[in-house]
Each structure stands twice: as C-alpha cells, then as structure tokens.
Image (spheres, grey):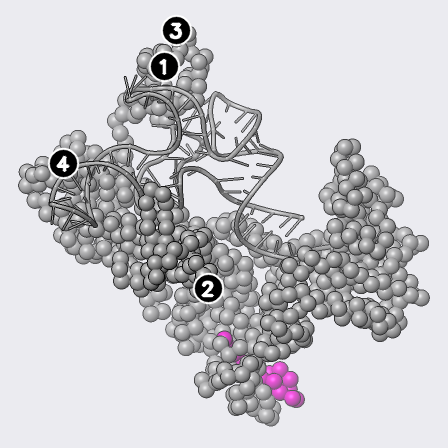
RNA sequence: GCGGACAUGGCGAAAUGGUAGACGCAAGGGACUUAAAAUCCCUCGGUGGAAACGCUGUGCGGGUUCGAGUCCCGCUGUCCGCACCA
C-alpha cells in the first residue's frame, strides 16, 4: 500500500494521522528513524541535558504545563513535584533564526500559520548588560549580574533588579537567609498555568545585594528575587524599569520603589497623557523621546537604543565588554524523551564505564518488547524484566538500554521523505528520489498542526540536510489548513448529553424541536461544536456510508462550506446531497435512453444555450478546483444540473422525436457533467459514465476540453445605474463601443425620466460591465 | 496584556471596487397520488403596493469613489493563537 501511496503524494494531501499511521506500520521505518537519531547525535543536533519537569508521583508521569490544574501545583489530589530529569533534546534552537526568516519564503502558506510560528519562535533583539555588584552586599564569588533587555534606551528608568528564584545568585544568597530560601521555594511551587499567572500578584524578596548602574557608578539599585522572572529566558535576570513595563510598575508600587518616566511621545498632548498614565500606575511601553535620562534626553528611543548599546559595548569591566547585542528567541529545544511504551525506542545504551554509547547501526532497529504489562504506573519498558539489560557495545560489560522512547512528533517529521523511497533498506532516504519528489507541493492538515508538527518537520528537514540525507530546507511548498466537521449538541432534561442517533428533530413553522426517541423527552438543542466523545455529538461514518453511501457524504461535506472553514454536519444537508445523487443517476439514465440520431454539427438556439451552460460550468469548475474552492465547484455543478433538467423537460414529452442537435448537446452536457463531478463523487460518476455508454473509466479520461467560443455571448445586458443605484438594463451587441452604449443608455425611458430634460453631469461606461449615469 | 481573523436572509454561503444574497438547506403554497413517500412547479431579506413598481438593506459611526459587502479611519461584538518572554 505504501507503493500505491507513493504516486499520489505529489498531488494529494492525507490527514496527518493517516500519514503517521502508514509511516509507523512500515516495519523498517523505526530502523531508519533510529539511524537518523544517531546521525543527528553525531552531527551535534541532539544533546542530553537536565530539564525540570512537572512530575505526578502517583501516576509516575511527566505532566505538561496545562495539565497542572490549579495554582498550588495539585492535580487530581496529588501534589505535583518539580523534578529534574535527564532528557534528550533536539537542538531546534540552533535553527531558530533560519526557521524564523525562512517563513517569509513560504508564500503558499496561510498568513495565519506563518504568524503563529513567528510568535512561537519569538525573536527579539536586545542587549546583554553586565551590572557590577557591590562587593560588601554580594555573596562570595558573585561580582556581577548579567541581564537581558530589549529596551536599553530605558536604562535610566531603572529602580531595581530582579532575578528568578532558580538563579544561581538567588540560591547563593538563600544559604545565609532562610526567609529568602523559603520565598524561593514558594515561588517554585507556583503553577505556571495561564489562569494562575493572571491572578498571581507580583511578589519579590529583597536579597540585600546591590547592583551598580552601568551608566552611573554612583547609583545602586536593590536586587530582588521576583516570582515573575523566568530562569529559562534571557539570563534569568532583569532590570526593572517601572515607567516602561507593566509588571515592573506593579512591582515598584508594591515595594515603594521609584518610578521614573524616561520615555514619552513627542506630541505635547500625548506626552501629558503618557505621564498621567504612568502616574496612575499604568506603564508607557511605546516609543517616543527620552527624558530624565541625562545624555539621552531629547533623543528618540531608537537613537537612544543604539547609543547605549554602542557605548556599553565599548566600555569594559574585568577585561570584558560591559554589554553586547544579543538576539533572543522564545523557542526552546525540542525535548523528545517520553517515558512511554508507544514510540520509537531511542537507540542508546548507558554503560557504567563508557557512558552514553550509541547502538551500532548494524544492530538497528532496537525493537520494542511485545510482552509488556500496563498494570502499574510508570514506563513499561523500565519495568520489563529483561529488555533494558544488555551488553555495552563498546566494552562488553553489562549495561542498560535507554528506556525513553521518542515523541511521536518525530515519526511525523519525516515520513514524507521516507515515502519517496520506502523500499530502500540501506538508508533512510535515497538522494535521487527524495530530492526529485520533495518538497511536497500541497500539504493539507488541520490548523491544530500550525505550530508543533509543521515547525518540527521544518526543523527535521534541515537536520536531515545537515546530515546529508536530503538537499532541501523546506518540506512543504504549499499548505492548506482545512476545517473540522462539527455538529449540534443535544442535552436531555437531566443535563446529560444525547447523541444525534438517539433523537428525532421536528420542524414546523415555529422552529426546530428535538425529542429523545427512547422516552419522548424534550431535548435542548445546543451549540454547534467540534465533535467529541464527551459531548456525544458525533456521527458514525459507517452509519452514514451504510445509509447514504460514501459519495453522498463526500458531496455534502464539500458542498456546505469552504474547505478552510468548519462544516456543520446536518441530517437535512446529507439528505439534500442524497437527493442530488438520485437526480444525477436519473439524468444519466434519461439521456442514455435518448435515441442517438445522425447530427450535422449545426446547433440551434436551445441546444446552443445548453452547450453554453455546460462549457461555462466547465470553465468555472476548472478554475475553482485548482484553488480548492470546492463549495463553488458544487454550486457550478448544480447550475449545470438545473440547465440539463430544463433542457430535458423540453424533450421529455416526446423523446423519440428529439431534434438531433438537442440530443447531441444533451449527450455532450451529460459527459461534461459526469466528468466535473467525478472527483467529488467517484463511484457514482463511474456508474453514470458506464450508463451513458462511455468506454473505460471516467477517472482515466482527459479533463474535458473547453470551447472558449461558447463562453462569449453575442449580446451583453448592461446594468444601468443612476447615481450608483441600479435602475435599468440596456442590452447591446457584445462589441458595441462606448459611444453607442452611452447613446442607448441616454435613450432609455427610465434614464430619460431621471434626467428630466437636463443633460447628465457625468456618464461612466465600463465596457462589458456596467454603466453609471450621474444626474 | 500582546498578536491575528471574522461580522452578509431562518441556516450554510456567493459576489477581480461595478446588478448584494449565485448555489444549496429549511419553510410556505401548488401539481401528481385513494394516501404517503419520491418527483415536478411556484414563492421566499425587510417594508409599502392589487399590480407595475418604489423605498430600504451586508454589526455601528465616519471617509475615499461616478459607484463600497469589498478600500481607509474610529467603535462594538465574536472567534482563534500566544501569554509574567524583560
């Protein structure tokens, strides 16, 4: 099946879950993923480092931040521990700059996705500044404190320094200060969930350490440990400029620290407003002109930024520059270690004497044991009696396998590359195949993959390039994010959710009511929401296919909404699609039954009108299908269906005597009709194609050839506006010139009445479009 | 808090700055039928009118334009992403 899939990859998209499933069913896939891991490790793209995680001691699992429910760090009754784990990290941050800047080259990606990735990568330009510490106040061996700031221009507004509770200086100062140590502990227990952050007040603890201002050695500021400073961004230390930062101003007001306005807009009124705003406790973080800033006064913020940066960079302290420019990223390295059974084993062996030893490539793949149990918390691989015990490939002594498995995002980060030559066993990819097939022309997935999957795949592709497995940077040339299928929700009187299959909808002039089938209880119709098991608003694909067929289901989904938007699954809508399926079959049958008569190639008015309709639909569908506007394709096909029905109605009373030109036109229209709908209703289309007496499969036919002459009408009916409002129609020959159109419009009765004898002030003729008369 | 998107009938939605509501669903009326289903025909933004036709209408307030659902400015609302990122 992978072989069959291969030819389609270029042109079609599959859902990520399908792709992932296909990829991981391939027994050789993990072998190559493990080989890639080892290549990445060798290439310095992977490192093993200590990371702090939320640990649920009861379930023995790592918790994601969003799983740590309440602010005190509890989850399902158990206290969440902060635990340090040694984990494997892919060094995506090494590519942060490139992953960010290359987003601009992805012109066929939705703007929204590119923006989300930009925000996620979070590039910022700033300055690293070293502040000297007053020796008498600082713990031994601490002579300076380095901070990161994006606003060096506001340095004269500094009134305090703040460091993270995990900052080395905080730890050192804690040793002689139990109260400070207690405060740091409390901060660590704080949750990091959004809800917690919103409600938590800014709190700090004065360490007693004082720092010397880099631009004025006579000026010192206190160093606090603060609960809002993050250890893993920048240096884990900041300088507080209350007038220019909302967090800092809250902190300063709480602890009675100075608030010095240093930036205000140049405009006098705006300046007063900004100063008043600061006085009332709201920071001004915009741009403007410097004040209260000594040699910077009067400069723009940009100029001050540059001057301070240059000046501090040229000054030196303890033999090194005081400051240097630094680009920082919000993006973190990708921790791929999972303490789970399901996933690709990490091909590493830990040896007491040799340390971390890669599994030799000829011993790959490291396979998961099949005799595992899930009867207790924790990682089954770790509990397995024999699996992890092995000999060190290097020294032969007893050693231990890595029991962590890879994040499954690793699997989905390169399957598209493997698919280009899935039979090769000697390497993950073969150069000719992978470089000729990739990048994927059109990728399709849900918006939920906007950041993680798509960013990881972009990174992994670059990593494979660095290790010589591929020659491209960007895996996906075009990206389309499709919507979800959503459904109404239903709630019984007792508040329980009721599934769509258990209810009946009654509709009358007063509206819609829902009743539970089992007990006739009135059911409340709720919002249309993403299908979920918990709200029971799901429909079973097997039921739909059993009742209506796959073509009906597909047709309905394509017809209802543009593909990037959610589509609401409704029983009425599916029934409508089902009726259309019947109609298509009927049309095919009726036209197939028309006697075939000799035709001389001349078409009369009625048959030409039908041919125009067919070719117009062909032109419109051809264009819209390329642009993935399937709901419009459906509308055009309905148009054509209506035109064919109308034509059929005329010949229906006596089909045996139908004019040969009309018969020919109907057959042509039917063929085009079936070919247009074949991509959306493939099964029905084949049946109809056969019924029409056409040879072979419609799927194998050439797309119909458009006759452009049929798109051009001989006449054009101009809408005539008077002062921008449509008041009349004037039908002209297609090639009538502007003057002729103008004359005809002015002669029109409605226009004459509006002009009331006066000449028009102005008349605009847009050839082939519209006429507007200004009176 | 920061960033972004969107707002059109009872509903899903159409509309390169050029006839707002294509196409479909729902609803109402009719034909066929003993009846129902299916099928076919008609009506379907609001409002006035017997009708012809008129007025009005794309969240709200302005602006640009011969002409704005579409472009610009300011609001309101909804949704999405990120979020103590210095």
The numbered mark, 1 or 4, whose residue comes first in the sequence reads 4
Q: Which residue is mark 1?
A: A751
Tell me the magenta residue range. Answer: A343-357
The numbered mark, 1 or 3, whose residue comes first in the sequence reads 1
Q: Which mark is residue A382?
A: none
Tell which of A98 and A256 is nearer to you: A256
Q: Which residue is mark 2?
A: A534
Q: Is residue A229 magenta?
A: no
Q: Does any portion of residue A637 appear in the rendered image?
A: yes
The numbered mark, 1 or 2, whose residue comes first in the sequence reads 2
| Horizontal and vertical percent position of residue A298 | 82, 38
Marked residue chain, label 2: A
Q: Which residue is mark 3?
A: A757
Q: CA distance from mark 2 to mark 3?
A: 72 Å
- Viewport quadrant of the C terminus of chain A: top left
Tell which of A12 and A82 is nearer to you: A82
| Horizontal and vertical percent position of residue A748 | 32, 14
Q: Is residue A349 magenta?
A: yes
How many C-alpha atoms fall within 10 Å of the one at disc 3: few (<14), some, or many (≥20)? few
Do marks 4 and 3 share a chain?
A: yes
Marked residue chain, label 3: A
Q: Residue furthest bottom?
A: A397
Q: Residue placed at 32% from the left, 13% from the top?
A: A749
Residue B72 sits above or below residue A698 on the image:
above
Q: Residue placed at 67% from the left, 65% from the top?
A: A71
Q: Which residue is mark 4?
A: A650
The numbered mark, 2 or 3, whose residue comes first in the sequence reads 2
Do marks 1 and 2 share a chain?
A: yes
How many C-alpha atoms fall within 10 Å of the one at disc 2: few (<14), some, or many (≥20)? few
């Amino acid at each position: 099946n992978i072989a069959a899939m291969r030819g389609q990859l270029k042109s079609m998209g599959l859902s990520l879950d399908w792709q992932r499933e296909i990829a991981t069913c391939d027994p050789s896939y993990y072998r190559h993923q493990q080989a890639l891991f080892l290549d990445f490790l060798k290439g310095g793209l992977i490192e093993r480092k200590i990371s702090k995680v939320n640990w649920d001691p009861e379930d023995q699992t790592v918790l994601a931040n969003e799983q740590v429910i309440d602010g005190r760090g509890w989850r399902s009754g158990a206290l969440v521990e902060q635990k340090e784990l040694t984990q494997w990290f892919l060094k995506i941050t090494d590519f942060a700059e490139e992953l960010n800047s290359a987003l601009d080259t992805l012109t066929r990606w939705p703007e929204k996705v590119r923006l989300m990735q930009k925000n996620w990568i979070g590039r910022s330009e700033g300055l690293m500044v070293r502040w000297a510490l007053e020796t008498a106040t600082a713990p031994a061996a601490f002579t300076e404190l380095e901070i990161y700031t994006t606003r060096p221009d506001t340095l004269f507004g500094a009134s305090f320094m703040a460091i993270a509770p995990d900052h080395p200086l905080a730890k050192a100062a804690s040793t002689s200060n139990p109260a400070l140590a207690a405060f740091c502990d409390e901060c660590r227990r704080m949750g990091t969930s959004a809800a917690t952050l919103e409600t938590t007040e800014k709190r700090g603890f004065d360490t007693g350490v004082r720092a010397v201002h880099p631009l004025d050695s006579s000026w010192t500021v206190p160093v606090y440990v603060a609960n809002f400073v993050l250890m893993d961004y920048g240096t884990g230390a900041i300088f507080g400029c209350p007038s220019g930062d909302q967090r800092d101003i809250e902190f300063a007001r709480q602890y009675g620290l100075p608030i010095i306005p240093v930036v205000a807009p140049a405009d006098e009124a705006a300046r007063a407003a900004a100063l008043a705003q600061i006085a009332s406790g709201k920071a001004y973080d915009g741009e403007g002109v410097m004040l209260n800033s000594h040699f910077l006064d009067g400069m723009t913020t940009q100029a001050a930024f540059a001057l301070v940066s240059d000046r501090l960079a040229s000054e030196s302290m303890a033999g090194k520059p005081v400051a240097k420019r630094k680009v920082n990223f919000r993006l973190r390295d990708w921790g791929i270690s999972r303490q789970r059974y399901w996933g690709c084993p990490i091909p590493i062996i830990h040896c007491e004497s040799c340390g971390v030893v890669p599994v030799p490539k000829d011993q790959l793949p490291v396979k998961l044991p099949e005799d595992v149990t899930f009867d207790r918390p924790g990682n089954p691989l770790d509990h397995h009696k024999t699996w992890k015990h092995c000999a060190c490939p290097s020294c032969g002594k007893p050693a231990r396998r890595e029991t962590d498995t890879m994040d499954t995002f690793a699997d989905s980060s390169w399957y598209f590359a493997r698919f280009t030559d899935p039979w090769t066993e000697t390497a993950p990819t073969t150069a000719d195949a992978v470089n000729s097939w990739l990048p994927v022309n059109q990728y399709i997935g849900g918006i939920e993959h906007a950041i993680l999957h798509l960013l990881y795949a972009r990174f992994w592709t670059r990593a494979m390039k660095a290790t010589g497995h591929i020659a491209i940077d960007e895996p996906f040339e075009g990206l389309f994010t499709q919507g979800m299928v959503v459904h109404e929700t239903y709630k019984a009187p007792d508040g329980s959710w009721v599934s769509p299959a258990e209810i009946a909808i009654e509709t009358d002039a007063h509206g819609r009511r829902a009743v539970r089938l089992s007990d006739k209880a009135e059911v409340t119709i709720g919002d249309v929401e993403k299908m979920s098991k918990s709200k029971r608003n799901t429909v079973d694909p097997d039921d739909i296919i059993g009742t209506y067929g796959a073509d009906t289901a597909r047709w309905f989904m394509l017809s209802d909404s543009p593909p990037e938007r959610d589509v609401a699954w409704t029983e009425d809508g599916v029934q409508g699609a089902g009726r259309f399926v019947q109609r298509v079959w009927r049309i095919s049958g009726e036209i197939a039954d028309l006697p075939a008569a000799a035709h001389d190639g001349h078409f009369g008015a009625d048959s030409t009108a039908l041919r125009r309709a067919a070719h117009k639909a062909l032109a419109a569908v051809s264009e819209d299908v390329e642009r993935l506007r399937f709901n419009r394709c459906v509308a055009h096909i309905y148009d054509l269906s209506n035109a064919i029905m109308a034509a059929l109605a005329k010949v229906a009373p006596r089909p045996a005597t139908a004019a040969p030109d009309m018969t020919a036109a109907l057959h042509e229209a039917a063929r085009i009709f079936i070919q247009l709908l074949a991509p959306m209703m493939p099964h029905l289309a084949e049946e109809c194609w056969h019924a029409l007496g056409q040879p072979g499969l419609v799927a194998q036919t050439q797309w119909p050839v458009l006759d452009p002459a049929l798109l051009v009408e001989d006449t054009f009916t101009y809408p005539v506006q008077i002062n921008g409002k449509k008041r009349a129609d004037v039908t002209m020959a297609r090639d009538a010139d502007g003057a002729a159109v103008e004359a005809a419009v002015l002669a029109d009765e409605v226009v004459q009445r509006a002009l009331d004898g006066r000449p028009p002030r102005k008349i605009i003729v847009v050839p082939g479009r519209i006429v507007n008369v200004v009176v």
